[in-house]
Image: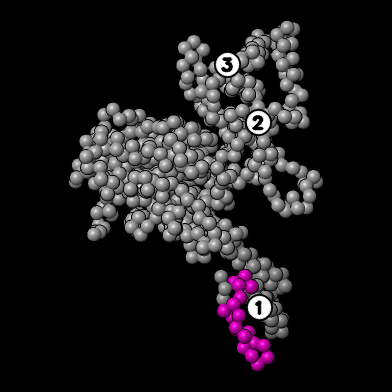
Amino acid sequence: RVQKISFFDKNRRIQRLVPVPQILDFMMALSKSLLSLLLFLGSTLALSPLQPSDISRFYSSSSSSSSTNLSMSTTTAARAAISKTKAFLPLAEKAVKYLTASTDPYHAVSNAVKMLEGSGFSKWSPTSPTAPGGKYYYTVQQSTLVAFTVGEKDAVGTRGFKIVGGHTDSPNLKLKPRSKCTSNKHNCIQLGVECYGGGLWHTWLDRDLSLSGKVFVRDAETEKITSKLVQFKDPIARISSLCIHLQSADERKALTVNKETHTVPIVASQSLVPAIEEAASEQLNVGGGGDDEEEDAANKKRKLDEASDDNDPWLESQEPLLLQKIADELNINIKQIADWDLSLYDVQAAAIGGMQSEFLYSARLDNLATVFCSVEALCEHSKDLSQDSDISMICCFDHEEVGSVSSHGAGSPVLEEAMKRVAMALGQYESHPETIAKSYCMSIDQAHAVHPNFASKHESDHGPLLNSGIVIKTNSNQRYATNTLTAFIMRELGRKLKIPVQEFVVRNDCSCGSTIGPTISARTGLRCIDAGMPQLSMHSVREVMGVVDLTHGVNLFKGFFTHFREINDSIELD
């Protein structure tokens, strides 16, 4: 707040913009001078004079009143902002629970399935009955998710597909096929890990880490193999940074992480392992503990003995303490462990932060924020399918962070087969080319918000902001699938739904990343757009986005499922 005031300096008039607080100070000083003059006049004219204490009291009360007004104004604005943010918190708090529990693609899909089943979705296969009004889902390799609804309204011609695509994986540290580190580790037991994707690996240093993923378990009697999800909640691993005193000046400046030698986590102290085994043996022989303690010690020693006696080469190459911990967690024998896919994760839970609770801090926002929002939107949409004549689908793939080229990544037949199988189940496969022409895919992956400390990294006219809307990503070299038509449809959705839409174009002097949009479009022929919710710290162990953008995401996807057909039909093309 400023006010223009004229000052006189000799014969020149000067106009300045003066902040309101300075104006108030000036007025208080002026009033004090006037009151002093009244005191003098009152004494001279034998009027009842104002005492100095009266002047002080007036000045004090006036100053206090002005300060209070300013304080009240500031407080009112802050309260209004916080009150506005509160409307977005229920969804954000739900996202916090999902993100905290979804520590790897397997748990991300498992938790999404729980959300779907809670909304009446049932597991589907190509032989399952498929009918208008139906709500279905299925998974591929436990880490890729397909879910869809069939509108109840009769379609004119064939039913089109309205698809929201995302991915379930994030950069992390995966256990190598042989997890045991055999070289001398200076009294530290470590696990062999491999860098998955393009992570900001220095952010993994000095974090409390644990393990989660999928374990193959062999039945002790039938030898049938089943998979079980495992997630250790306690911090069992840590990658410690090198203290500053042992780094050269050049090393301090570089902040370089060697992915092979600097990312190996410490999980235990070698010197204590014999002591643990001895303590277990003593409890068995001496009877120092209660029955429960003796039984627990016996089980641990039995599992260790089984691990050492088993001649399975794969088991022999694994860290014994890890084998024991998995066996304890799943309540199985070590020799029943057949294989696994385990990754490290940061045990710090997701949280809502910021002075107005406007930010969401979490690992794996790229791209589990999309998975959460798309599942939430489909569940909401499924509550009333009476006005929908199309198929609303979400498809969340694994392996985007490493190129999508796998049996169940975006470059696989998963989406193409999903569309064909659903079309066949509904009896419209013969018109599949018409179905493709009536369909549209939103490839949703998190977008880069402008970092206030590195604003020059963004193209000046295409800098997305946090809490300011969905971001359309465009690249004329086809690193993104966005084109004029697909971008218009999203902007029209935003206009209709009153959801702000932002634009992102990478600087000409920077390389451009990519995501699943071009892959899906090239493989299926679908019209496709690349877009996402803005965030900071992408690929860090800890990322941040705005809580308002979560709501924008859910509302956009819901609106897409509801209004796409009318927008699409309004477009006339040759």
Residue at which label 2 appears: 191
Q: Residue at x 51, y 63 (%)?
A: 508
Note whether 160 is above or below 277 in the view shown.
Answer: below
Q: In this view, does 7 lie to the left or right of 463?
A: right
- Residue lying at the far right in this picture: please name it: 245
Q: Which residue is drawn at 60% across and 67% down?
A: 66
- Of badges 2 and 1, nearer the viewer stands 2
Residue at which label 1 appears: 30
**Amino acid type of disc 2?**
Leu
CA distance separating discs 3 and 2: 20 Å
Q: Is residue 501 magenta?
A: no
Percent x, y of residue 321: 66, 23
Q: Is residue 264 left or right of residue 100?
A: right
CA distance separating discs 3 and 1: 89 Å
Secondary structure beneath disc 3? helix
**Amino acid type of disc 3?**
Lys
Q: Looking at the image, tell me whether mark 3 or mark 1 is earlier in sequence order.
A: 1
